[in-house]
Amino acid sequence: MTGMENNAQSTGFRTTTQHMLKTSKEYASQTLMGGLSGFESPVGLDRRDRIRALKTGDIGFVHSWDINTSVDGPGTRMTVFMSGCPLRCQYCQNPDTWKMRDGKPVFLDAMIKKVERYADLFKATHGGITFSGGESMMQPAFVSRVFHAAKQMGVHTCLDTSGFLNRNYTDEMLDDIDLCLLDVKSGDPDIYEKVTGGVLQPTIDFGQRLAAKGKKIWVRFVLVPGLTDGEENVDKVARICQSFGDSVEHIDVLPFHQLGRPKWHEMRIPYPLEDQKGPSRACKERVKEQFESYGFTVY
């Protein structure tokens, strides 16, 4: 009996019959591991069971994962990029993560075992696991269950999010988050909508909920000339960060760049910032000083 069949039986899932499965190479490349080496993909589950398993967190749709150092949190980290995002940021680096169906379904047990495999490394380097995206809060059950298992192993947990899906996370789910990389994409609601297509308030609400729980926050702010760099907008971002109190350890000012443009071209999506330049040194320094004037450590 295969590992997939064991998992299917142990969780009560039904499996599709052979004639229900596509056999083309294209389907296999889209649905199997492709970039997710070491994970078994539950391609044999029928559609109803996939939907149910997604809601319960028994499976998650994952774009890719990586081991890195000091990029997505402290120490050596396993960063898991989840598929699916409700926002459409003009400067998005990963438009290939927008649609959940483009990810690969991964069993919860397989993800937990992967964390367990690296647990000693994480502890030795003061690292851990980070869920990013896409938007990891689109799959709250899967992410929170992995985080809960990681905490039981003594592994540090980090959520990289826009906070836009604030209500997707219960207070109980917040308990297993050690650190949040919170993208405050704008301080002005109109600019936020222009940048993302979404609304600002849920990000503020989520940051304040984290602060009430005493969670650490690293704020991320993408600096785009002519879009997010206005002095008034930066001041509004700073005031939002002030509402998070002492939870904010620092603010990362991330200069806009064009590294994501090739993906937009490859996917044939019109790129709104085609000719946009990055911020000047003077602009970066001015924004850094603005945040520092509010008492924040800025990187």
Image: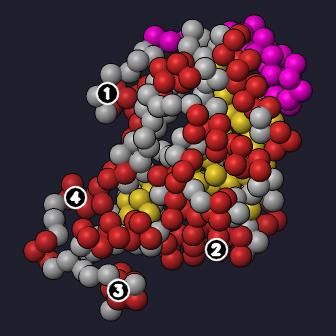
The reply to whether discs 2 and 3 touch (Cβ–Cβ < 8 Å) is: no
The residue wearing badge 3 is 12
Look at the numbered disc 3 and give the secondary structure of its residue: loop
Question: Is 289 in the magenta?
Answer: yes
**Residue type, numbered disc 2:** Ala
Q: Which residue is mark 4?
A: 27
Local secondary structure at mark 1: loop
Graded by Cα atoms within 10 Å as few (under 14), some (14 to 19) or many (20 or more), the crowding at tag 1 reads few
Does 124 appear in magenta? Answer: no
Left/right placement of residue 178 relative to residue 59 reads: right
Whether tag 4 and tag 2 are in contact, CB under 8 A, the answer is no
Residues tagged 4 and 3 counted as in contact (Cβ below 8 A) = no
Q: Quadrant of the C terminus?
A: top right
The structure residue drawn at horizontal position 41% and vertical position 66%, both measured from the top left corner, is 55
Q: Which mark is residue 149?
A: 2
Q: Disc 1 designates what residue?
A: 269
Task: Sort mark 4 into few (<14), some (14-19) or many (20+) by Cα contacts within 10 Å.
Answer: few
Mark 1 or 3: the one toward you: 3
Q: Amino acid at mark 1?
A: Ile
Name the amino acid, label 3: Gly
Q: Which residues are magenta?
A: 275-299
Query: Is residue 89 visible from the viewing direction of this image?
Result: no
